[in-house]
Image (cartoon, helix red, strand yellow):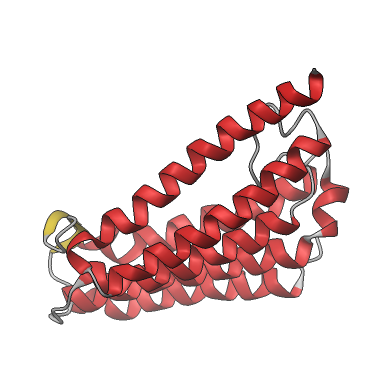
Amino acid sequence: MKLHKLEVISLILVILSFLVGWYFYPQLPQQVASHWNSQGQVNGYMSKFWGAFLLPIILTGMFLIFLIVPRIDPKRENIEKFRTYFNSFIVLLFLFMSYIYALTLAWNMGYQFDFVRFISPAFAVLFYDISILIAHAEPNWTIGIRTPWTLSNAEVWKKTHALGAKLFRYSALIGLLGVIFPKIAIWLILLPIIASTLWVFVYSYLEYRKIKR
């Protein structure tokens, strides 16, 4: 199976995550802080092993899924039409998760900071890249806004993704405000995305009905 250049970069990020976990493992506490509430306070812990290696294991699983599933997608020829955007998104997603991993390790190494404020710009960048991806996505079963109605009609797919790209772009800008307003940052991240997701779902249904009429 031949790997694309950006898939190789994703694989390198997976390997690096294991090396980072191995390097910092001896320095981590027995109970690793792993979850923060909306105010940036720790409210969840896990064992030392999982604190060091859970994310590398998750990245490994994700890499295998993103490697195999697009190649067996019934509409894989459509994925190839926007493959560069797809692979770029995977790299950015892995960088995003690696960034969260780095923040978690730093916190457990004794560095104290406003966790929510630090993740807000990362979410904004991720959402913005998602907007670019779905703006170029062609009909497929692997990635994109896959509702029963977008998958049933190419025109509905196109209109829904055009709207979704705009909404995710706006969500990215709103999420970025979390840097300025850290106390409500989690809501500036979650609410726009939830609202956008619900609206594109409903919109795809309404457009499908309109076309069928």
Task: Classify residue 47 by image quadrant.
Answer: bottom left
Marks counted in the figure total 0
Q: Is residue 47 left or right of residue 95?
A: left
Residue at the image point whose x is 57% and y is 34% from the top: 201
Residue 49, by quadrant, is bottom left
Where 77 sits versus 34, above or below? above
Image side of residue 176 versus residue 30, left or right: right
> Does residue 70 show up?
yes
* Residue in front for this viewpoint, 60 or 170: 170
163 horizontally vs 34: left or right: right
Question: Residue at the location (35% across, 63% down)?
Answer: 53
- Vertical order, 5 against 192 (above or below): below
Q: In this view, does 139 lie to the left or right of 116?
A: right
- The image shows residue 206, relative to residue 7, as above or below, that is above
Q: In which quarter of the image is the C terminus?
A: top right
Q: Position of residue 176 (x, y in %)?
A: 38, 70
Residue 180 position in % (x across, y down): 26, 75
Q: Position of residue 76 (x, y in %)?
A: 83, 47
Can residue 143 be seen in this snapshot? no
Q: Residue furthest top?
A: 213
Could you say which is closer to the camera, residue 75 or residue 105? 75
Q: In which quarter of the image is the N terminus?
A: bottom right
Q: Where is residue 160 in the image (x, y as percent from the top left)?
A: 68, 42
Picture residue at 85% right of the left edge, 58% below the top? 81
Look at 25% across and 72% down and name the residue there.
117
